[in-house]
Image (cartoon, rainbow, N blue to C red):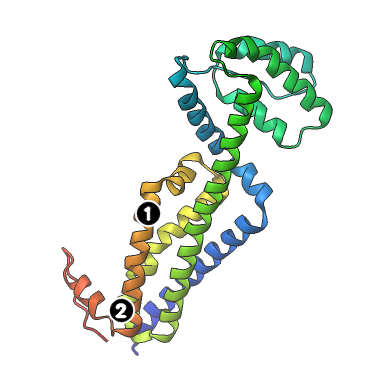
């Protein structure tokens, strides 16, 4: 094996090791740190819950719910008064109030918060025939369902990428002569590695939404399935299909099977 091919093999191994390390670490994080995962995801989950709440209430002839509650602080009395004034300001902060009550407030503050929510929203929900307890139940139900679904989708995303990267690493190590055939795969999958790292570091809602999207999620799984077939071809079929694929590109890369 020439020096050029050996360099490509080293690049393949390095990219695959990076992918295995990132996807493996993030998968372990999602499985072992549910509370931190929930904390990082709360903004996205609240947005999803808001959409669900509006959809459930709109058939009853209601305008979009504009229900707000502020976080408790040292100026608790003023904030409770603000809750009543903010009924017209939008759904998200009502959801934030319910989530806050679920997520670790002490008993005294939770009781005060729930009293404020009840006082502020009872009259506005009466014409919808939806009580505050019912609305709170709707929020909590959607919150927990979205959290479970999001954790499942991210686990699938990380697990599938980890499996593909591990297979690519094995081929990179044991099929050195096919290094040029293999290089496009870890190079492309490195985009997913960078995306996963970005999601963990910054936790942006748009990044979470990409993984959560059914259309994108299934499309990506199909893409990984195709990658898996190509890895099988490189590892066990002398890269015949990969050679044909690279040769058929708009800018052909003529590589013979090996």
Residue reaching furthest bottom?
A: 1
Residue sitting nearer the eye, 115 or 210:
115
At horizontal 77% and vertical 32% (from top left) the residue drawn is 105
Q: Secondary structure at mark 1?
A: helix
Query: Counting other residues with Cα less than 10 Å from the Cα at mark 1, is it few (<14), some (14-19), or many (20 or more)?
Result: few
Q: Quadrant of the C terminus?
A: bottom left
At horizontal 46% and vertical 64% (from top left) the residue drawn is 160
At horizontal 30% and vertical 79% (from top left) the residue drawn is 233
Q: Position of residue 5 (x, y in %)?
A: 34, 83
Which of the marked residues, 2 or 1, is nearer the chain's N terminus? 1
Q: Is residue 73 left or right of residue 137?
A: right
One can see residue 4 in this view: no
Q: Secondary structure at mark 2?
A: helix
Q: Quadrant of residue 246?
A: bottom left
Q: Position of residue 209 (x, y in %)?
A: 46, 43
Can you identify the residue that label 1 sits on?
218
At horizontal 50% and vertical 55% (from top left) the residue drawn is 196
Can you identify the residue that label 2 sits on?
233
């Amino acid at each position: 094996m020439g020096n050029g091919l050996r360099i490509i093999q080293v690049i393949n191994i390095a990219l695959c090791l990076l992918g295995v390390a990132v996807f493996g670490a993030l998968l372990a994080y999602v499985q072992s740190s549910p509370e931190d995962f929930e904390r990082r995801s709360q903004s996205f989950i609240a947005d999803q819950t808001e959409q669900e709440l509006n959809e459930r209430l709109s058939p009853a002839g209601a305008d979009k719910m504009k229900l707000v509650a502020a976080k408790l602080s040292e100026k608790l009395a003023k904030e409770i008064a603000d809750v009543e004034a903010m009924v017209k300001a939008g759904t998200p902060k009502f959801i934030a109030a319910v989530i806050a009550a679920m997520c670790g407030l002490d008993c005294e503050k939770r009781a005060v918060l729930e009293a404020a929510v009840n006082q502020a929203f009872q009259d506005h929900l009466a014409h919808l025939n939806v009580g505050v307890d019912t609305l709170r139940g709707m929020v909590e139900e959607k919150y927990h369902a979205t959290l479970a679904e999001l954790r499942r989708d991210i686990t699938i995303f990380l697990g599938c990428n980890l499996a593909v990267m591990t297979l690519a690493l094995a081929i990179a190590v044991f099929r050195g002569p096919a290094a040029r055939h293999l290089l496009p795969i870890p190079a492309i999958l490195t985009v997913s590695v960078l995306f996963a790292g970005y999601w963990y570091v910054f936790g942006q809602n748009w990044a979470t939404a990409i993984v959560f999207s059914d259309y994108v999620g299934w499309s990506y799984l199909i893409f990984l399935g195709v990658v898996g077939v190509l890895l099988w071809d490189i590892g066990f079929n002398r890269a015949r299909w990969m050679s044909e694929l690279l040769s058929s590109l708009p800018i052909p890369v003529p590589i013979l099977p090996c």
